Image (cartoon, rainbow, N blue to C red):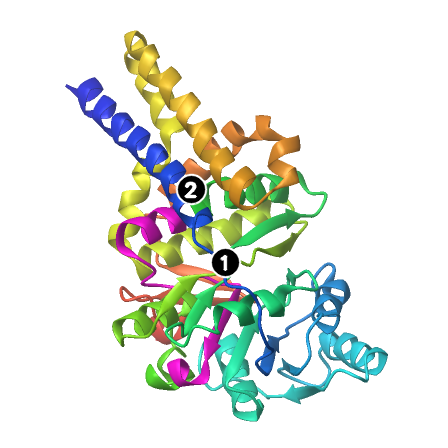
Amino acid sequence: MAQWALAAVVLGSLVYCALVVVAARSYLGVPRRKFEQPTPISILKPLAGVDQGLEENLRSFFRQDYSGFEILFAVGNAGDAAAEVAERLRAEYPQVPSRLLVTGEPPYPNAKVFSLDRMLAAARYDLVVMSDSDIRVGPDMLRRVAAEFQDDAIDLATCPYRAVPGPSFWSTLEAIGMNTEFLAGVLVARLTEGMKFAVGPTIVARRRALEGIGGFDRLKDYLAEDFVMGRFAAQAGFGVILSSCVIEHRIGSQGFSENAAHRLRWARSTRRSRPAGYLGQLFTNPLPLALLLLSIAPAWWPLAAAAAVLRALAAWAVAGWVLHDPLTARRWWLVPVQDLLGFVFWLAGFFGNTIVWRGRRYYLRADGRFEPASRRER
């Protein structure tokens, strides 16, 4: 009986792989709007510490082939090393209007949301790009998103991202997973139900959409503030899309323990933010499921072989067709390794409701909000 149940799940995962391919083609088939004229844009950059490659990441935003934009940086305190990097770039590019804000200690758990709130209050323009410090973009990034927002029905856009790791083996595995699996789920959701959510680390939005969902004050207690921002916007009737502009997510180089803690935090956060979707991720693991089936019923090898073929096709539909990822093209043989490791972290994500973020321990509530764990332990 167990082998039949597992075979049914593997079949379900094959259907999912086929959906990934269809979803990738659907996304690529959307006509891209031609850029006509610049819309003033405010770029909001929350900073906290010096990530690997921070200076080049920030420099890529100063080098935009675009007129009429400003860059706002925010740090929690003036002694943050990231402030020095931002000031150095501001001096290097005096022709680009830019400001550095010192926000102080946030009054609620999500420090990033607090920084965004302070920057939005100081921003001049109605169209804003909210982008993390580990993002690097091409010089045409603003032109591409501005073209999409020439459609007045579009209020919020998520930029898909291509993960670029440092030299660490564990970061390389994570990047391959992000480039072959994470975006696949986003594309399938877009195909089957439309964009009713957003995913970081770069989101473009009109000020009216942010104000229409209650501002950042409504997001302050959520760990996955990007996801709920898009969800609240869609629920309020604002137009949400997956942008055509692919950016680079420079994830740095982490050892195993740091990388494992990061992955576990992500898994637990996802489970608490959208429990049904997290359970459904079972079907996004065709290779581990096929190996489990082979271990108890070797006669099912044709189904396992089909899982390997369809997983490879789905991985390339995302990494190759959509993201043009050289890492996966070069180290494709690591995809099965990452799939097995990712499956382990997915299972681990079902256990525990606490995370460690920026050196502090937090408790995740059932609705995706979080609070200092010390508050729960009193």
Q: Classify 367 as above or below 68.
A: above
Is any atom of residue 310 visible in this view? yes
Amino acid beneath label 2: Arg
Question: SS for tag 1?
Answer: loop
The percent position of residue 148, horizontal first and vertical second, equals 49, 67
Viewer can see residue 214: no
Q: Position of residue 96 (x, y in %)?
A: 75, 82
Give the residue displayed 72% in from the left and 59% down from the top. Answer: 52
Tell me the quarter of the picture where residue 161 sits. Answer: bottom right
Q: Which mark is residue 18?
A: none
Which of 14/1 is in front? 14
370 left or right of 42 in image: left
Image depth: mark 2 or mark 1 in front: 1
Question: Which residue is labeled 1 in the image?
Answer: 32
Q: Is residue 238 magenta?
A: no
- Place residue 144 in its image quadrant: bottom right
- Point out residue 241 in the picture as x, y percentages from the top left corner: 40, 63
Location of the N terminus by quadrant is top left
Residues 238 and 363: in front is 238
List the residue tagged with mark 2. 25
Q: Which amino acid does the dot numbered 1 rest on?
A: Arg
In depth, the one of 235 and 75 nearer the eye is 235
Q: Residue at x 79, y 84 (%)?
A: 95
Provide the residue span drawn in magenta. Answer: 185-210
* Residue 310 located left or right of residue 35: left
Gap between marks 2 and 1, in whole Å?
Answer: 14 Å
